[in-house]
Image (cartoon, rainbow, N blue to C red):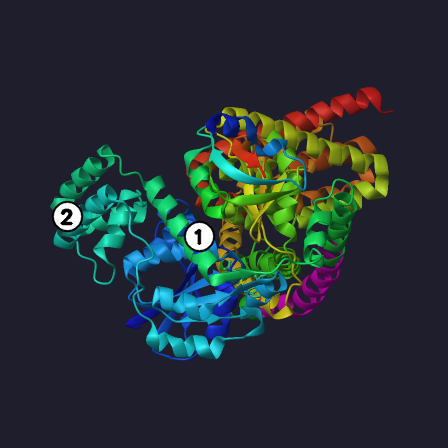
Amino acid sequence: MSTHDHKARVPLAFLLPGARAEVDALDDAIDPTQREQIIAYGLAPGRPLIVLQQHPMTLVMIDEVELALEDSVARLVWVTRK
Amino acid sequence: MTASAIALVGNPNVGKSVLFHRLTGAYVNVSNYPGTTVEVARATARFDAAVDLIDTPGVLTLPARSDDERATMRALLHEPLRAVIQVGDAKNLRRTLTLTALLAELGVPAVLALNMHDEAGARGVTVDAQALSSALGIPVIPTVATGGEGMAQLTRSLADARAMLPLLHYDTDTEAAISDLANRISLHAPHPRLNARGLAILYLGQDSEVEAWLSEAAGENGADLVSARAAAQAKGVLPAALAHERGEAASTLTSRVTARTEQASPLLAHRIGQLIIHRFWAWPILLGVLFALYEFVGVFGAGTLVGLMENDLFGNILNPVVTAFVREHIGVVWMADLLVGEYGLWTMGMTYALALILPIVTTFFIIFGLLEDSGYFARLSVLANRLFKLIGLNGRAVLPMVLGLGCVTMSTLTTRILHSPRERLITIFLMALAIPCSAQLGVVLGLLGGISFTATLIWAASMVGVLLLAGFLAAKIIPGRRIPLVTEMPPIRLPLFGNVAKKTVGRIKWYLIEVIPLFLLGTLIMFLLNQFGALPAIIRAGEPLVSGWLGLPPEASAAFVMGFLRRDFGATGLFALSHQLSPIQAVVGMVTITLFVPCIASVMMIVKEQGWKIAAAMIAFIVPFAFLIGGLLNHLLRAVWL
Ligand SMILES: Nc1nc2c(ncn2[C@@H]2O[C@H](COP(=O)(O)OP(=O)(O)O)[C@@H](O)[C@H]2O)c(=O)[nH]1
């Protein structure tokens, strides 16, 4: 199961608009304070999301929250497609 | 201060301010805690004149990390709180309850206002307030702050405010570490209102306000707390894990009390929100917004209103009366001059602040409030992010910069919304250098527009070029990391007139208190320079540079010195010379004046925000740089544009 999981893991920045996914992990390369904030915004491991747009920034919907992330951060958010 | 206070606490943008205004009367006192830049509003409660209501800044995470969060923590620690009203967003219950979980640990008596009930409903989200209330053990009141729904129930429920039931227990090791720390806190530094357990959790999470409070209260026993915390950390008790646990507990409770129905079609608000940042449609929409801004602030505010105030009210009525009165009653000439002379506190300082700038900032604040409440601003920062990335900033800096087009002095103060000191420094520097304020913009466009479109275009291109170049270099030179933009998009909403009006009034008041003293101080310095004959000397000293290097008439030197007093003055000074200026001279003059040091009031503001040293360094860079660019442009244009 773990190998399968690993394969399905992609950066959030790579998903197309409309895609549904679940947050897998936030990369350690994200600034620690910003990491806390991102989690507080609701982008936390295990949470489902829908990608709304990828331009000009990554825009995702988590429950009823729309969150915009710059590409450099969206590349560091690992998700699994659903 | 009254003996009892109630604080509104909650995540950002959940409707705290609207609720605050509903629950208080007209008189609101806005203040800063010592050492913080964040404003905390305070007013007497409508429902009980003995109670002070405090509107705290929004918290995203606790332990506190941002200035806003620290100010809120400070209110919890230091205010004589009888209770808190946690304001939460019903459509975002998880985040609300993550904060609730921490407030529960602190043991403050609370009620929960579940606000934005209307928006939750429109999205098919219903929260079972009854179930939530029994889970938390406190009153939970659904509200719509903007419509005034639930206000009576909310005030009534305050009588039943009590400490909440805990939302979670951590794992055994963590619990052991927390109780150990909590015991020590109870022993060395008991808080009159807050539970030691909650303080222990925040202290483990390195909340700087809690650290400061405990170390003061514990005195020499503070070392005991420090070593207990170090021991806990060594055992692997990590703050991030605690925050995660709270998030999980909030999630679980949220799923238990929330029901969702799938919506058939996306909301209109969603579609508009996406159009605003759409690849193609974003740009016509932005142009439309800028045009409206220009019409309302530039044409109506800076033109019509300033005309009425400056010429009709002050020029024709007030100033002659005040001048006559002062001259008649004050015999000492220099004292009379100080009030109503050429550089008089009244005739120059107050006239400038009230007749020229006040109408502009008022119209500006109105538009600003509209854009803020509609949800446009958050999206504008998304649009601008890529451009701001080039200059080491992120899209959030677009707000102060746009505001700078109104008044740089004022916008320097609003850089407080930026998250890092580095971003603040770069933004303040760039605004001082290359953002023309509205007073100046009017003169520049008037003069250059009268010459040719090309002239205006060269000026605009020079400004953008300098902004990008200087920003790029500043980002390289100023140490620290750029913080990428991650931001929430508030829903698109129709702004409410009452809400925008209240905000505008609050901001105007703040302008009058914060900015006007600086204009007066600036005027005073100018008056002294003039009294002691320093002005003509400075003007003469600048002449070789102005006529040689910049190729302008010698008289323009005075315009530069005056430009320091008032940014628009410099431009106006050149305007007065305009019949003598060739197109090249006009462009060079305007570019140099715009780049030249901002007005003296904005320098005072930079000193206030960044200290003397940084302000001096900025001026030491900006003045030669303005002349350098102006001179280069002069020589370039003479070579290619005949
Ligand atoms: N639809 C709706 N909008 C609200 C409600 N309460 C506040 N707002 C809007 O939400 C935005 C943020 O409110 P504000 O009071 O500034 O939030 P604060 O940051 O928590 O102080 C404003 O545009 C308000 O008009 C509500 O109950 N329903």
Question: Could you say which disc has been placed on residue B251 in the image?
Answer: 1
Q: Earlier in the sequence, mark 1 or mark 2?
A: 2
Say left or right for B493 vs B188.
right
Assign the N terminus of chain B to one quadrant of the image: bottom left
Q: Residue at x 45, y 40 (%)?
A: B610
Query: Is the residue marked 2 within 8 Å of ligand 1, measured from its CB?
Result: no
Chain at numbered mark 1: B
Assign the C terminus of chain B to one quadrant of the image: top right
Q: Secondary structure at mark 2?
A: helix
Query: Is the residue marked 1 within 8 Å of ligand 1, measured from its CB?
Result: no
Say left or right for B388 vs B222.
right
- Ligand 1 occupies quarter: bottom right
Give the Cα distance between marks 1 and 2.
Answer: 39 Å
User: Label 2 is placed on what type of residue?
Assistant: Gly
Q: Is residue B331 visible?
A: no
Tell which of B311 and B630 is nearer to you: B630
Q: Is residue B209 visible?
A: yes
The picture quadrant where one finds residue B102 is: bottom left
**Region in magenta:** B297-324
Q: Which residue is mark 2?
A: B219
Circle 1 Cα neighbour tier, 10 Å, few/some/many (<14 / 14–19 / ≥20): some
